[in-house]
Image (cartoon, helix red, strand yellow):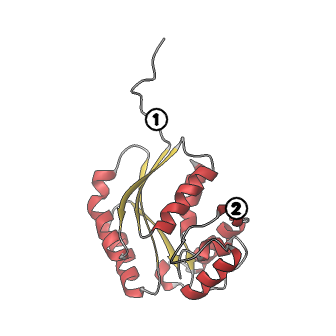
């Protein structure tokens, strides 16, 4: 009889994640668990930084070293009114020629759970945060910035809207939009693993 001692789990997807804040990280960890993907998806927290340009530069610098079987490098951040930094970050990644995926949100990460409620007309960070607090009373941007996935009922509707927003750009960069929910690209990748 063979022992399993010392064998490493074989993941279908390893996400090498460069992330901006704890809200994004917490959401992705909960989403993986909710989708029952803990055995097939591994989330490696590589780097955390509040500046999108620095995150992008770190991802470009480390991309080749992080590549392994079944792995993808992802950078997730939101606009939060930092148009110049966001543009620099996305352009840097796109011009690098590296295989780096971007999960960009505009105006902010809070737009994603709002989209699960059919609320897709928010273009200001403060408005998104206020609306989210009314839907998720436990959510407080400064004190408890964590999403309750049980209060995010319409995932498919949110993905459909996010794809519509992307299509409407007609190939223009994400930062040219007034609202964008690129996190759907990462969640769909997780669901498909």
- Number of marks in picture: 2
Give neighbour class at mark 1: few <14, some 14-19, many 20+ (Cα, 10 Å): few
Left or right position of 47 against 165: left
Whether label 2 touches label 1, CB < 8 Å: no
- Residue 48 at x, y percent in the picture: 37, 66
Q: Nearer the viewer, residue 65 or 78?
A: 78
Direction top: furthest residue:
1
Q: Would you say residue 167 is visible in this rendering? A: no
Where does residue 181 sit, x and y in percent of width and height?
A: 57, 73
Residue, x 53% and y 42% (percent of image)?
40
Q: Residue at x 54, y 67 (%)?
A: 183
x and y percent of residue 161 in the render? 67, 73
Location of mark 1 (residue) = 9
Q: Which residue is rendered at x = 56% and y = 77% of the image?
A: 180
Question: From the viewer's perspective, is the residue at label 2 or at label 1 nearer?
Answer: 2
Q: Secondary structure at mark 2?
A: helix
Q: Is residue 72 left or right of residue 65?
A: right
Q: Which mark is residue 99?
A: none
Q: Is any part of residue 155 visible from this angle?
A: yes
The quarter of the picture where residue 54 lies is bottom left
Measuring 73% from the left and 76% from the top, which residue is drawn there? 118
For the residue pair 23 and 189, the one nearer the viewer reads as: 23
Q: CA distance from mark 2 to mark 1?
A: 29 Å
Per the rendering, the mark at residue 150 is 2
């Amino acid at each position: 009889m063979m022992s399993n001692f010392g064998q490493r789990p074989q993941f279908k997807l390893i996400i090498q994640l460069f992330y901006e804040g704890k809200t994004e990280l917490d959401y992705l960890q909960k989403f993986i668990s909710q989708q029952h993907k803990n055995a097939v998806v591994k989330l490696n927290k590589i780097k955390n930084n509040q500046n999108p340009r620095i995150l992008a530069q770190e991802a470009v610098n480390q991309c080749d070293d992080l590549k392994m079987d079944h792995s993808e490098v992802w950078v997730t951040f939101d606009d939060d009114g930092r148009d110049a930094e966001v543009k620099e970050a996305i352009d840097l990644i796109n011009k690098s020629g590296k295989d780096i995926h971007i999960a960009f949100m505009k105006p902010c990460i809070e737009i994603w759970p709002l989209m699960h409620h059919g609320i897709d007309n928010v273009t200001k960070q403060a408005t998104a945060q206020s609306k989210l607090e009314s839907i998720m009373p436990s959510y407080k941007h400064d004190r408890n910035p964590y999403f309750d996935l049980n209060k995010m009922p319409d995932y498919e509707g949110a993905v459909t809207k996010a794809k519509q927003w992307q299509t409407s750009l007609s190939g223009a960069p994400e930062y040219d939009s007034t609202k964008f929910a690129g996190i759907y690209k990462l969640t769909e990748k997780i669901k498909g693993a």
